[in-house]
Image (cartoon, rainbow, N blue to C red):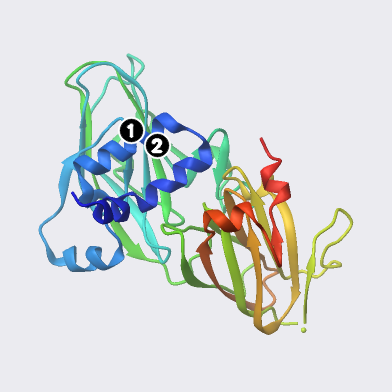
Amino acid sequence: MSPSFKLQCHFILIFLMALRGENRYLELREAADHDPFLLFGASLKRELAGAPLYRRALRCLDMLSLPGQFTFTADRPQLHCAAFLIAEPEEFITIRYDLVSIDCQGGDFLKVFDGWILKGEKFPSSQDHPLPTTERYIDFCDSGLSRRSIRSSQNVAMIFFRVHEPGNGFTFTIKTDPNLFPCNVISQTPSGRFTLVVPHLRQNCSFSIIYPVAIKISDLTLGHLNGMQFKNPSAGCGGIGDFVELLGGPGLDPSKMMPLADLCYSFHGPAQMKIGCDNTVVRMVSSGNHINRVTFEYRQLEPYELENPSGNSIQEICLSSP
């Protein structure tokens, strides 16, 4: 496999570096070397849309970004397993159990989590998800095949599982469905452009980019007028019910990140910032009284930009984080 091809396949794996979990990163990197189709981008996914159903074995620690059928079979006791599922920003994920052979009474489990959870941090955060945390877990050992199909509320989901007996396991199929108004999103790529729209709904929506990035906001419509201000402990949008905030930090949960800037009023024309955090979030808070919209572009910062920050950048906060 050529170096450029490997780089394309490994793009999405960079998110693991935010966890500082080198063993997980290496294991998934080896998985991509073995099966590069796992991590192809959106253009190839569209080309494969009419192809026969994609099938492969599921690993104890895995990352899935392509619809298909996946089978896990234990070759030894597997006690700490998880699969990260990610779709395009404008898609929901549906997981359908085709066959399950596990021993719930013997300590096995198979759970779907609506979102991602890493080191105790959740995305979407509890503040931004429509369900309480306990209802975001769907446990096969509680529901059985009465909940054969489970759909996520956003473009990411997780499967946790434990299988003691060799030969036991399960098979499931992933498919995706359009999401006309995506609210909470984790970006698959280190660069891109996105428009977040909240249409007369009282909800908070976060777009998460798990890379240090330069971000440029080109358009913001909030239903009321103009401005951007940098955050300090006493600052805010003065009680305005609709606003956008930029957040940064080393973890996954937006509610645990440092607020970096508030965008309190509508404006047209670029406002940009470099944020040297492992994770950057554009978060929109909506009262439900307006149609709110924000359009932004983002790209991963180059190493020299992290070493020599200049201009409108925020880095010290993130570099001092553990």
Q: Residue at x 56, y 56 (%)?
A: 304
**Mark 1 burial class by Cα count in 10 Å: few <14, some 14-19, many 20+:** few
Q: Give above or below for 202 relative to 93.
A: below
Q: Give above or below for 19 relative to 292.
A: above
- Label 1 and label 2: CA atoms lie apart by 6 Å
What is the three-letter code of the residue carrying label 2? Tyr
Circle 1/circle 2 CB separation < 8 Å: yes
Foreground residue among 143 and 310: 310
Please tell me in which quadrant of the rendered image residue 264 appears. bottom right
Q: Residue at x 18, y 49 (%)?
A: 1
Query: Which element carries disc 2, helix, strand or loop?
Result: helix
Q: Residue at x 43, y 72 (%)?
A: 180
Number of the label disc, if any, that sits on residue 106? none
Residue 193 drawn at (x, y percent) = 48, 72
Would you name the residue on which mark 2 appears?
25
Q: How many marks?
A: 2
Q: Give above or below for 72 relative to 295.
A: above
Would you name the residue on which mark 1 appears?
27
